[in-house]
Image: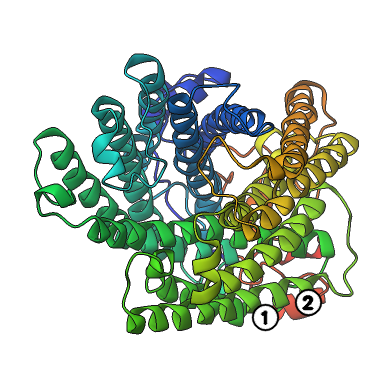
Amino acid sequence: MTIAIPPTSNKKSDQLQPNGWLRYFSFSLDHKVIGLQYLVCGFIFYLIGGLLGSAIRVELASPISDFMARDVYNQVLTLHGTVMIFLWIVPVVNGAFGNYLIPFYVGARDMAFPRLNAVAFWMIPPAGLLLISSYFITGAAQSGWTAYPPLSLTTPAAGQILWILSVLFLGGSSIFGGINFIATILKLRRPGLKLMQLPMYCWAMLGTSILVVLSTPVLAGTLILLSFDIVVHTGFFNPGLGGNAVVYQHLFWFYSHPAVYIMVLPAFGLVSEILPVHCRKPLFGYTSMVYSIMAICVLGLVVWAHHMFTSGTPPWMRLFFTIATSFIAVPTGIKFFNWLATLWGGRISLNSAVLFSCGFIVNFVLGGITGVMLAQVPFDIHVHDTYFVVAHFHYVVYGGSVFVIFASIYHWYPKFTGRMLNENLGRFHFLLTFIGFNLCFAPQHWLGLNGMPRRVAEYDPQFTFINQLSSAGALLMAISTLPFLWNVVQSAFNGPIAGDNPWRALTPEWLTSSPPPVENWNGEAPLVTEPYGYGVPKEQLDKTGTSNSDHRSSGQ
């Protein structure tokens, strides 16, 4: 039995929207358009952030400052970190795929608050332009993406204030998006669809959105207080005026460590959608994966001070945060076991989506191992503020989130455009990215263990060769973007027609046309209670009462 869901969009207002490509440059209320706006806008900033990262690696190819001045290096370093986190990874893994997929997964016609959804996106381009333009107008901030005082209080004020304004806009966008996702998942599920029947990405986005709503306001308040210290010379964090710079660190990391999970948890959910389809197997351990996501959310809020083991933290605090950080490896390890069990014995298609997903598993495991190492106080003190931390962070964030973003684009591109990407170019893109990434960041573990500090343009000449290897890897990563761009653009016009469901998938977004209509389905929304029912006999699926069993039988 199926139950129709009334449309949530306004037909009259839909008729006033531009058609064709123009709708992607408009204030659209369609969640699919907004999702693609997030994706394209984020990728543009990814290219900018990549250029900034390449400039850093060019400078570090030699041990002296010969490519850019020291203050320019500090500005580029600050912009690179801020752009990649706040303008690329967070908007794409949350806003882009969340907006596109969540209404399909809950059986809704749109997000709970379509106008708030559009506002959340349109806060991002001006914030990004404000951040980038600061380099040319006043000189960008020079205190790194963490903006620690007293450094952020003593560098040129104008660039730092523009950085704060930009991050406040981006934080507001995240909060609006988080509220929207929570309301959509909990309140717009079609009748008959239970929480424990939702695709895993819904649980990942629910957990992520809870973290966003709880932690992002803390960052916003912290940056407002920092701006007061800069502009009107208050003493919240200024030691010279009786303030406490360590309090800033506590407040900043209360947001910024959960921010790692804000970037990674959605990636966990996306991988959990991709692997069952291309392995033709049910997702292993659905219930344990749900509980592990929620455990990560809880523990993610109580591990922030492991970033501060060298900041004068008392022994009891070091002990507590060491234990809490070590515990968070348990639910994360459960998820990796479940992904490997899903792969085990499956009929795996080694296409680009699967290759990038497997690359994510390899890279994130390595980043997780070094994370457990950094959770131990003696080791952390030895490598604190060295390139070991840089390597760990990039294995978690780039090796985790960015690899999954590419996997997701290869998987859902036929849904976005109705056309297939070129698999040979996709595999070439993966090969260049995987080799370049590991060549760039794996040697940095050795640099950190041997004492090379991060965030400096000049270093001991003994580290020159390893830095040149790292810079060669960065060059490969930059080159890898070219076949991807060519593939995406030419396939949009000349790629093979995909059909509605080229992967024979069972999740709801594939049970409509590709690309989907404005209202998502021409008729009633399907009730999908077994989104990973691969290999399950049709008769058994019929007994569950699912209304899309006919579609499922074609997915075996």
Q: Amino acid at mark 1?
A: Gly
- Image-based side of 425 in relation to 8, left or right: right
Q: Is residue 549 above or below residue 521?
A: below
Q: Position of residue 432 (x, y in %)?
A: 82, 39
Q: Which mark is residue 341?
A: 2
Q: Position of residue 360 (x, y in %)?
A: 71, 57
Q: Which mark is residue 311?
A: none
Figure quadrant of the N terminus: bottom right
Residue 155 in which image quadrant:
top left
- Image-based side of 476 in relation to 62, left or right: right
Q: Which mark is residue 285?
A: 1
Q: Nearer the viewer, residue 150 or 189?
A: 150
Q: Nearer the viewer, residue 448 or 219?
A: 448
Q: Callout 2: few (<14), some (14-19), or many (20+) C-alpha neighbours within 10 Å?
A: some
Q: Position of residue 302 (x, y in %)?
A: 37, 74
Residue 417 in view here: yes
Residue found at the far top of this picture? 137
Q: Residue at x 69, y 81 (%)?
A: 543
Q: Position of residue 177 (x, y in %)?
A: 38, 48
Q: Amino acid at mark 2?
A: Ala
1 or 2: tag closer to the N-terminus: 1
Determine the CA span between mark 1 and mark 2. 9 Å
SS category of the residue bearing label 2: helix
Q: Residue at x 41, y 43 (%)?
A: 145
The reply to whether dot 1 and dot 2 touch (C-beta < 8 Å) is: yes
Q: Residue at x 41, y 75 (%)?
A: 298
